[in-house]
Image (cartoon, rainbow, N blue to C red):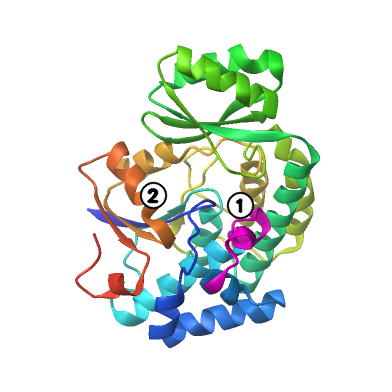
């Protein structure tokens, strides 16, 4: 059987993330230093010391999570925790898809970092342009969630945005529609958790951000990945550069089908998953998607022992 590396997306940031790995491993330290030079500001200080309100902003947390995940991956290779060519498939949730494409050989580090930073800026701008938000729906089926959105749509546009795992779907929409959805979720027997995010990500509210990002994607150097990388929009695998550009464009305003991605990787032979990045969010989702698949996480220096993390 095979193994997959998976990388987290926005919301997985932690104050202090990457500091212990950077202190202990020169390659991680060099990764942060390179990122600081590329961006022209100290992303490393933001990751290690905050302030948290800045780290939590969309345009900051996206490059911060990307660089932390890459630093952890490189340190894990150097420490022998993982091996070159170990993974049959790479995948990532939303922002994490860029990490997977970089480590799969499709995007150079500098290009990927600049893209991720720009993506965060554009999504932040689109979020500020209209009052919108996201609500995590727990305990309802996909059909019930669609019905909730239809019920709330009289107050504004709203639709499913993240299919994370069985019983957890995130919806995105106009702020008034989100408020209406919370009541409808309660009536349907589910639990609503409004998310502390800047706006309605992975919805049509992000179309202006996607259109501007498409211009950036058109000029960045992209190659076909050397390792299979699964894409969020349809749980298929990335192919040639043109299709990668199109998938990353559509990903900004399309639902993230993470549960479907994991199920596809399992169906294609992966029975071991290693989450590389801060906070173990995907490891938690994995246990809800398929308990028989082995899941480990590499998020702190202590996880880099060759014996592995749990």
Image quadrant in which you'd find residue 199 = top right
Quadrant (top left, top right, bottom left, bottom right) of the C terminus: bottom left
Q: How many marks?
A: 2
Residue at screen point 51% across, 46% down: 231
- Across and down, in percent, residue 248 comes to 63, 49
Spatial separation of the CA atoms under disc 2 and disc 1: 23 Å
Q: Is residue 51 magenta?
A: yes
Q: Is residue 299 left or right of residue 170?
A: left
Q: Is residue 52 left or right of residue 207?
A: left
**Outermost bottom residue:** 26
Residue 282 badge: 2
Magenta residue span = 49-61
- Across and down, in percent, residue 58 comes to 64, 54
Determine whether 141 is above or below 15 in the image: above
Q: Is residue 118 magenta?
A: no
- Across and down, in percent, residue 267 comes to 31, 40
Residue at screen point 36% across, 76% down: 77
Residue at screen point 43% across, 61% down: 278
Q: Is residue 189 left or right of residue 43?
A: left
- Which of the pair 253/43 is nearer the observer? 43
The residue carrying pointer 2 sits among few (fewer than 14), some (14 to 19) or many (20 or more) residues within 10 Å by Cα, namely many
- Across and down, in percent, residue 276 comes to 39, 62
Sequence-first tag of 2 and 1:
1
SS under mark 2: helix
Determine whether 69 is above or below 56 in the image: below
Residue 189 badge: none
Asked whether residue 212 is in view, the answer is: yes
Q: Which residue is mark 1?
A: 244
The residue carrying pointer 1 sits among few (fewer than 14), some (14 to 19) or many (20 or more) residues within 10 Å by Cα, namely many
Asked whether residue 214 is in view, the answer is: no
- Which of the pair 132/298 is nearer the observer? 132
Viewer-nearest of labels 2 and 1?
2
């Amino acid at each position: 059987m095979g193994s997959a590396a998976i990388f987290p997306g926005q919301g997985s940031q932690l104050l202090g993330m990457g500091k212990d790995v950077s202190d202990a491993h020169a390659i991680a330290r060099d990764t942060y230093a390179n990122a600081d030079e590329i961006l022209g500001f100290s992303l490393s200080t933001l990751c290690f010391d905050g302030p948290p309100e800045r780290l939590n902003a969309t345009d900051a947390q996206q490059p911060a999570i990307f660089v932390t995940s890459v630093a952890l991956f490189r340190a894990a290779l150097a420490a022998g925790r993982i091996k070159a060519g170990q993974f049959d498939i790479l995948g990532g949730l939303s922002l994490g898809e860029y990490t997977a494409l970089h480590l799969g050989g499709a995007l150079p580090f500098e290009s990927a970092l600049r893209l991720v930073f720009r993506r965060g800026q554009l999504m932040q701008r689109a979020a500020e342009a209209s009052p919108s938000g996201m609500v995590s729906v727990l305990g309802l089926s996909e059909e019930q969630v669609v019905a909730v959105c239809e019920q709330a749509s009289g107050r504004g546009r709203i639709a499913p945005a993240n299919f994370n795992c069985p019983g957890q779907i995130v919806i995105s929409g106009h702020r008034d529609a989100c408020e209406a959805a919370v009541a409808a979720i309660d009536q349907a027997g589910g639990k609503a958790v409004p998310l502390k995010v800047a706006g309605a990500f992975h919805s049509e509210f992000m179309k202006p951000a996607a259109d501007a990002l498409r211009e950036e994607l058109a000029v960045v150097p992209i190659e076909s990945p050397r390792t299979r990388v699964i894409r969020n929009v349809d749980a298929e695998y990335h192919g040639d550069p043109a299709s990668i550009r199109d998938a990353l464009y559509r990903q900004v305003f399309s639902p993230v089908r993470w549960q479907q991605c994991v199920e596809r990787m399992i169906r294609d032979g992966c029975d071991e998953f290693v989450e590389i990045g801060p906070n173990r969010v995907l490891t938690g989702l994995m246990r809800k998607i398929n308990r028989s698949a082995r899941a480990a996480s590499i998020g702190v220096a202590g996880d880099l022992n060759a014996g592995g993390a749990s």
